[in-house]
Image (spheres, grey):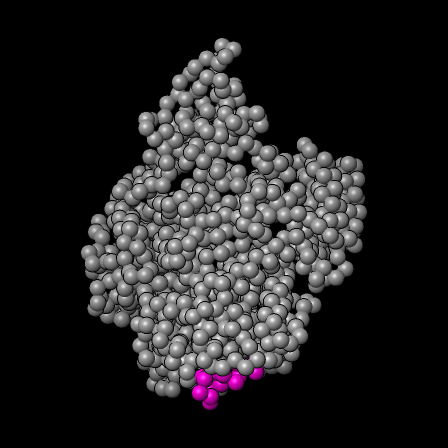
Amino acid sequence: MWPLTPGINLATAGRVSTQDAARQLRTADAILRSLADQPGVVLADEVGMGKTYVALAVAVSVLEATGRANPVVVLVPAAVAEKWPREWQVFAEHCLPPGHGLRGSRPVKRGSDLLKLLDDPPEERQHLIFATHTALTSRLTDPLIRLALLRQATRYDRDRDKHRRVLAKHAHALLRERRFRGAAGQALVATLLEKQPGRWKQVWDRGQPEDPLDDDPVPAALLDAVSGLDLEDLRQALAAVPVYRTANLEERLKVARAQLEWALGEVWKGALQRLDVRLPLLILDEAHHVKNRTQLGDLFANTVDERGALGNMFDRMLFLTATPFQLNHDELIRILRRFHGVRWSSQAARERFDDQVEEIQNGLNRSRAAALRLERAWSRLEESDAPQVASVGTFEIEEGQSERVRTAITAAAAAHDELRSAEKLLRPWVIRHTRASRTRRRDYHPGRAILDGRDTGSGLTVEGDAVLPFLLAARAEAIANLHNAGKASPVRGYYAYGLASSFEAYADTRAHRIAELDDLETPDGYTPDTSATAAEDQLRWYVERIKTALPHDTVDGWAAHPKVAATVSRVVDLWRRGEKVLVFCFYRETGRALRNHISRAIRREIIDRAAQALGGPAGDDVLAEVDAIAERLLRSDVSGYDAFRERVASYLNGLDDETAQRAQDIAVRFMRTPSFLTRYVDLSPNLTIEGLLAGLDRGAAGATFADQISAFAAALAQQVDKERDDVLHALASIQTGGIRVTSEHFDTSEHSHDREVLLPNVRLVNGEAKPATRETLMQTFNTPFFPEVLIASSVMAEGVDLHHACRHVIHHDLDWNPSTLEQRTGRVDRIGSRAARVGQPVVVYEPYVGGTHDEKMFRVVKDRERWFGIVMGESPDSSEWATERQAARIPLPPALARALTMDLATPGVHDHRRPLEPERPCRRRRNPSPRGAPAR
C-alpha cells in the first residue's frame, strides 16, 4: 500500500547509531507493510528506543506515497506537545534529503485550530499536524467560529434581522471578545453576519487592517457539518438575549451567555461528529491513554449509533506506547478495537477485523490462564525448593526434584506453549523491541547500597530520633494486618506509606487521610464489625503517638529521616563530582522537602569549600567573598572577562560566530556562581584570572569545566536552529541566584511552608509546575548548567527526554508497578544518552528502609518485574495479603523469565529474549519421582 520512502537516513551523527537506525528503518518498513491489509499497528518498543523517529519515517512515507494530498495527524499528550514539533525539525533537517519541502505545524491545542489547518489550500497546508489529546475534547472558544454558528442558527429565522442586530450589539459580552466592543466592533459584527463565512477574512482585513487574520476564520468542513444539525436550542438561547437596556441587563446577559455556552457546546460536539474529512494516517502517542472509556477514547467511535470526531476520518492508524504489558488483556483488546475508527472499505473488512481481534482475545486469555496457573504453582514453592529452581535451564522434569518443583516446571512448559500461540496471533498487530541486557547498560544500587555502592541485600537502617516513629508504625501495621486477614474491606495504614518517604510526607498524609480513618458512620440498619472499630481505635492511638514521636526540629531533625538523609548524601556526593542527578518521588511534600534538604546540604558544602580555600569562617560572609572574586575577575568591564571568553571560545568547536558568542555569555554567567567556582577553580583570596583559567582544565573529581563546555558545544553543533535557539534562550533566562535565594524567585509549585533558602541549581517539577517552567527545566537540565539536581514527580516520568547530561537516577519513592520504575529510568536510559556517550552505565539507586513497608514494596516490585511479561494483563494487586505473599515468593530465575516473555520483534531485528534451552527445543520429560508418584 505505502512503501518506505528511499532517502530517509536515521543514522544522524552523534544522535543515533548505525545499528539503531537500521532497526528503526526495518521497523518503519514492517509497519507500512502491515498497514497494507490491516487498519492499524501498535508500536510498543521499550522506553528510549526512538519510537518518535520510527513514526516520523512512517508519516513521511505515507505522505510521499499519497502525493502529499492530505496531512498526517499526530495526537500527543499535552505534556509533550512541544517535543514532537521539535523532534520533527531535527528529523526534517538531519534525516531527509535537502529541499524536501515537507512542513510540520506548531502544537495545536484547540479543535478549531486543527480544523483551520485542515482547511488550508494545498500549497499552504502543513503536511504533519501535531495536536494534543485534548484538542478535540476541549470546549469551543474561537469567537469567530462561535459567531459563525450563531449566524447559521439564524439563517431561516423569521426574526433573523432582529436577532442579528441584538447579536451585533451584545457580541462582545456574549462571546467575550474585546474586538467586538464599541460602535466599530458592532459594525464589524453586523457586516460579518451579512456575509458568507468564506468571505469573512476579506471583510475582517478591510475593517481591521492593523490586526489582519492569518487564516480563513471558519473552516468550510465545519459549516458543511453544521448544515444538517438541529440548531433549535441555539436559536432559543439567542432569543433569550435582551433587546433593550434595562436595570438588570448584566444579569440577563449572564443568563443568556450561559445558555449560549451550553448550546454552542452541543452544536460543536455534533459538528465534530459529522465532519466529512478523509486523511491517510493518524499517529497516537502514549496510546495506553485510550485503554478505557474516556473523552479521548470516545473520539474513535465509528458505528451507526455513535461516531466520534476521529471516527471514519483516517485510512489507517499507528499507536505508540512503551507499556503494552502494563495493560491487562481487556485493556489491550480495547486499544486494538480503537482501530474501528478507520474509514472501512467494506462491511466485510470490518467484520474480518472483529473476528481477528476476538481470536487474539481468546489466545491471550488462554495464555493468561496458563501463566496464572504457573504463578500459583510457583507461589507454593518453599524455601527448601530454592536451590532446585535457581539454576533451572530446561522444561524437563529431573531426578531429585520435589513434587512442588515438578508441578511448577510442568506449569511453566504449558505456559510457554500457550504464550507462543498467543504471540503468533499478536505479532501482526503489536511490534515491540527491547534493548540489550540491562546488566550491561545499568548499574543498580538497591537499599543501603545508595550509601556506599555495596549491595548487601539489606535496606537502610533507622537510627536516633527516627527509631520510635518507625517502631510505632510497624506495630500499627501489624495490628492492621491482623485485622485484615480474610476481611473484604481491609483497614489501610496510609500513614506507613508517607512515613517511609519522609517525615514531611507523613505529616501531610496524616492531615489529609485522617478524615478517612475518622469516617466511621454507617448506613441505617448496618451492624458494624466490632473488631474493625477496635482496630481503627487502636490505629488512631498509634497515629497520634507517631505524630508526637517525630523529631521536634523540623529542619535538621526531619533531614535525619533515613531515606531522606541517604538521598541527600548521595546527591551531594554526585554534585561534588560534577554529575547531574534526577530524583523521582511520589509525594509532593517529599519533593519539596528534598529540594530544601538538598539545597541546604549543597549550600553547606559550598560554604565549607569556600571557607577552606579562603581561610575564613564558614558562613554567609564567605559567600560574599566568593561573589566579590567573581565580580573582580569576570565583570564585563575588566580584562579577565575577555580572557575568560577567549579561553571558552577555544572549547567551542564547530559553532557559528553568533552561537559561539551566546555560549560564551552563558559560560560567564554560570562560572560566576558559587556552585561552579568552588568546584571548577582552585579558589584563593588573591585568585588571578590566570589562576582561574588554569583551573578550568583541572576542576573537581570528574569532568572539568573545559570538558563540560566542549560537550555543550558538541551538542549545540548537532541541534537544528530552533532547538539551539530555545536552549540558549532558556539558559540565558533561568535563575542562577545570588548569595541568598528565597522561594519567591521560583515557580509557585516549588514553594515550601517554613524553609528559608533554596539553591537555583536544585529544582523541583511536579504537577503544579507551569508548563513554561517545566519546558525550561527540561531543556536546561540537558546541558552542563543549571539545574544540576532535578527532583520530579510522575509528571516527568513519561514522554520527556532528560538523558543528554545525566546518567544517575534515584527512585526515592518506589512503586508497586515495575512499569512505573522503568518509565522513570527510561528518562535517562535512551538512545544517544550521556551514559552511552561516555561509555559508562546508567546508575539507578533504589533506596528503601529495611524492615518496613518500604522493603516489602521493593521485594514485591522486583518479583513483579520478573513476572510482568509472563502474567501479561494481571493487574497488580497491592492488597496487604497479596504483597505479603509476593514479597516472600521464591524469585523466578532470569532464564525462565526470558523464555516466558513474548517476542514481538520485527524479523531481522535481534531479540534480546534468550531461549531457556539454547542448544535444543524445550521439551518435557515425565520421569518418576523417587517415590514413584507421577509428576502433575
Q: For this rendering, which residue is in front, 643 or 225?
A: 643
Q: Residue furthest top?
A: 932
Q: Residue at x 45, y 69 (%)?
A: 698
Q: Residue at x 74, y 53 (%)?
A: 465
| Residue range of the region highlighted in magenta in the rendering | 627-641
172 sits to left or right of 428: right
Q: Residue at x 50, y 23 (%)?
A: 405
Residue 214 % position (x, y)? 34, 77
What's the magenta bit mostly, secondary-structure-wise?
helix
Q: Quadrant of residue 324?
A: top left
- Looking at the rendered structure, the number of numbered marks drawn on it comes to 0
Q: For this rendering, which residue is in front, 794 or 147?
A: 794
Q: Is residue 214 magenta?
A: no
The answer to whether residue 162 is visible is no
Residue 167 % position (x, y)? 47, 77
Q: Is residue 638 magenta?
A: yes
The answer to whether residue 825 is visible is yes
Q: Quadrant of residue 91?
A: bottom left
Residue 907 % position (x, y)? 27, 41
765 sits to left or right of 37: right
Q: For this rendering, which residue is in front, 729 or 160?
A: 729
Residue 566 % position (x, y)? 61, 54
Vertical relation: 497 (above or below) 558 = above
Q: Residue at x 32, y 79 (%)?
A: 657
Q: For this rendering, which residue is in front, 13 or 821?
A: 13
Q: Residue furthest bottom?
A: 637
